[in-house]
Image (spheres, rainbow, N blue to C red):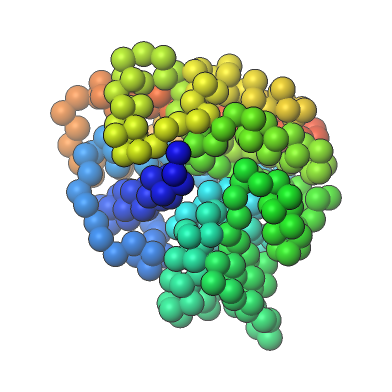
């Protein structure tokens, strides 16, 4: 399979996020610098993205609270994600933040950062140097690097260039990334992380419960866009999602479908966003939520008690 259709999913997801932000689902002052055009999406899609962003955010906050200022974040298949800038606006300090994606994608991101003062200002440390190539950018504790996650030796070299410490507690984020990678490559990646990092949390947002008619329709839509999902066998259910970590030497794993994630978000926030757009019926939204999940795996004991309600 060509990598182009997978790279195109970044544009689609970024446009969806920009549209939802514009409608007021959540705040993101930085996504407009990466995405110019907005195409109207169905209310179910917007609520789905809200649940995805807020659900992943809760695990990020829990990680940062536990790990403190020595924490590192490695965002796999980051695309045009704006998390670094949003965390910076919240006054969050971490020792290192690394984004990894195909070089074609990171080249576009580096270009956008370079030409927008508002983005560049937030990553530039006083007296610090900004190192910029066509596909990579290093500035202070922010690193955007082009690498293929299927190539472990290249990945290790690039992480070393980004001054990643294998001893520091590290959060790995992957949102609809592993499903596009062959199973043996994902196993190699997870096994390599487990062999290198002492303390880590991996937050994976992805499809699940795909063995039904609704799942078939989802797969058909993706295949029509040229995306063959090489890792779909791990998306069979929550158990297969968790087994991927356990079989690759992670200490433990937990998983929740997006129905649970969504209804565990603060009720006042849910009520607020449910007023933004009228939904004819809940059934389609619930079906959508049943076919996505957040699965977490951990190394060390620090994150073993993690839960989807963020402790509130």
Q: Residue at x 44, y 44 (%)?
A: 2
Question: From where the camera sits, is residue 241 visible?
Answer: yes
Quarter-wise, where is residue 310 in the image? top right
The total of numbered circles placed on residues is 0
Question: Percent x, y for residue 207?
Answer: 45, 28
Asked if one can make out residue 62 in the rendered structure from this viewpoint, the answer is: no
Which residue lies most toward the front here? 1
Q: Give the quarter of the image for residue 270.
A: top left
Residue 32: % across, % down: 34, 65
Give the camera-side residue of 243 and 185. 185
Q: Residue at image x 75%, y 39%?
A: 192
* 191 left or right of 85 in image: right
At 70% from the left and 35% from the top, the residue drawn is: 188
Q: Quadrant of the C terminus?
A: top right
174 or 189, which is in the foreground?
A: 189
Residue 215 placement, left or right of 73 = left
Q: Where's residue 309, x and y in %?
A: 54, 32
Residue, x 64% and y 73% (percent of image)?
139
Q: Is residue 121 above or below residue 28?
A: below
- Residue 70's x, y, as percent? 76, 56
Q: Say if 30 sits above or below 298 in the image.
A: below
- Quadrant of the frame with the N terminus: top left
Up the image or down, 115 lies above or below 190; here it is below
Extreme-bottom residue of the structure = 127
Nearest the eye: 254 or 273: 254
Question: Is residue 210 found left or right of 125 in the rendered image?
Answer: left
């Amino acid at each position: 399979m060509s990598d182009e259709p997978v790279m195109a999913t970044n544009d689609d997801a970024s446009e969806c996020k920009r549209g939802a932000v514009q409608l007021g689902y959540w705040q993101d002052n930085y996504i407009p610098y990466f995405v110019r055009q907005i195409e109207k999406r169905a209310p179910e899609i917007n609520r789905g993205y809200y649940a995805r962003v807020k659900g992943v955010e809760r695990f990020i906050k829990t990680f940062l609270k536990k790990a403190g200022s020595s924490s590192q974040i490695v965002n796999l298949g980051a695309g045009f994600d704006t998390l670094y800038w949003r965390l910076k606006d919240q006054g969050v300090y971490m020792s290192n933040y690394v984004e990894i994606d195909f070089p074609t994608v990171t080249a576009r991101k580096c270009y956008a950062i370079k030409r927008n003062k508002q983005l560049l200002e937030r990553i530039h440390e006083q007296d610090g140097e900004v190192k910029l190539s066509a596909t990579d950018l290093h500035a202070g504790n922010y690193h955007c690097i082009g690498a293929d996650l299927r190539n472990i030796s290249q990945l290790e070299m690039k992480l070393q260039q980004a001054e990643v410490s294998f001893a520091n507690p590290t959060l790995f984020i992957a949102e609809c990334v592993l499903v596009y990678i062959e199973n043996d490559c994902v196993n190699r990646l997870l096994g390599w992380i487990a062999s290198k990092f002492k303390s880590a949390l991996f937050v994976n947002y992805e499809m699940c419960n795909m063995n039904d008619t609704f799942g078939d329709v989802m797969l058909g839509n993706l295949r029509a866009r040229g995306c063959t999902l090489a890792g779909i066998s791990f998306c069979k259910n929550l158990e297969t999602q968790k087994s991927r970590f356990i079989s690759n030497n992670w200490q433990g794993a937990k998983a929740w479908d997006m129905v649970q994630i969504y209804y565990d978000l603060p009720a006042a926030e849910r009520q607020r966003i449910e007023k933004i757009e009228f939904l004819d019926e809940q059934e389609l939204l619930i079906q959508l939520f049943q076919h996505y999940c957040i699965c977490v795996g951990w190394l060390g004991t620090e994150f073993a008690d993690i839960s989807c309600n963020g402790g509130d």
